[in-house]
Amino acid sequence: MKFNLHIDQAKFPKWIYAGFDNYADKFRYPYELVLVEKSLLYKNLIKYSNLAKPFSQPMGHYYIGLDSPSKVLDSEQLSSHLQSLSQGFSELHFFIGSAYGHPDNVKSYFDERLSLSSLTFGHQIMIPIMAEVIYRSYTLMIGHPYHK
């Protein structure tokens, strides 16, 4: 299962990358966490959302928009949800919006939308936060004691 974290920006402070890498480096095959900066996929979702021709996502891929307000899950619920998604999908794509969120016409391409909290976070800080959240879910899925 490949977890892709998309953001439509690049060139973050070093501590953002260090926070992401701290968790991404801990994943073991067949799991992988990848940061996709200046995401072409996200740009295409925006581009195609303005056209009459719909965007077709690849088989085995599932799109999750990180958006507030949306469904909020605790760590165990998220892990269970990702575990069930892993039965039918090979790649999960998490999309971090800009400072203004996701454009309304792009939201229709997400298979679901999740919120991590009722708090608002800057989109840059979401990179290490999501890395930890996905890592925590991964450790719950494989029975690792990290969550305890």
Image (tube, rainbow, N blue to C red):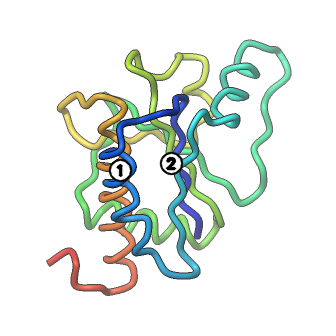
Residue at (56% x, 39% y) in the render:
37
Residue at (65% x, 66% y) in the render:
90
| Picture layout, residue 45 above or below residue 115 | above
Helix, strand or loop at label 1? It is: helix
Query: Who comes first in sequence, dot 1 or dot 2?
Result: 2
Quarter the N terminus occupies:
bottom right
User: Which residue, as the protein is rendered here, is positioned at the far left?
Assistant: 148
Who is closer to the viewer here, 14 or 142?
A: 14
| Picture layout, residue 58 above or below residue 85 | above
- What amino acid is at disc 2? Leu
Estimate the x, y position of residue 131 in percent, counting from the top left. Answer: 37, 56
Drawn side of residue 116 relative to residue 57, left or right: left
Q: Residues within 10 Å of mark 2 (few under 14, many from 20)?
A: many
Q: Quadrant of residue 108?
A: top right
Estimate the x, y position of residue 101 in percent, counting from the top left. Answer: 42, 21
**In the rendered structure, are the residues bearing label 1 and label 2 in contact, judged by CB atoms less than 8 Å apart?**
yes
Drawn side of residue 54 relative to residue 108, left or right: right
Residue at (39% x, 72% y) in the render:
138
Residue at (51% x, 35% y) in the render:
7
Estimate the x, y position of residue 3 in percent, counting from the top left. Answer: 53, 59
> How many marks are shown on the rendered structure?
2
Q: Residues within 10 Å of mark 1 (few under 14, many from 20)?
A: some
What residue is shown with label 2? 5
What residue is shown with label 1? 130
- What amino acid is at disc 1? Met
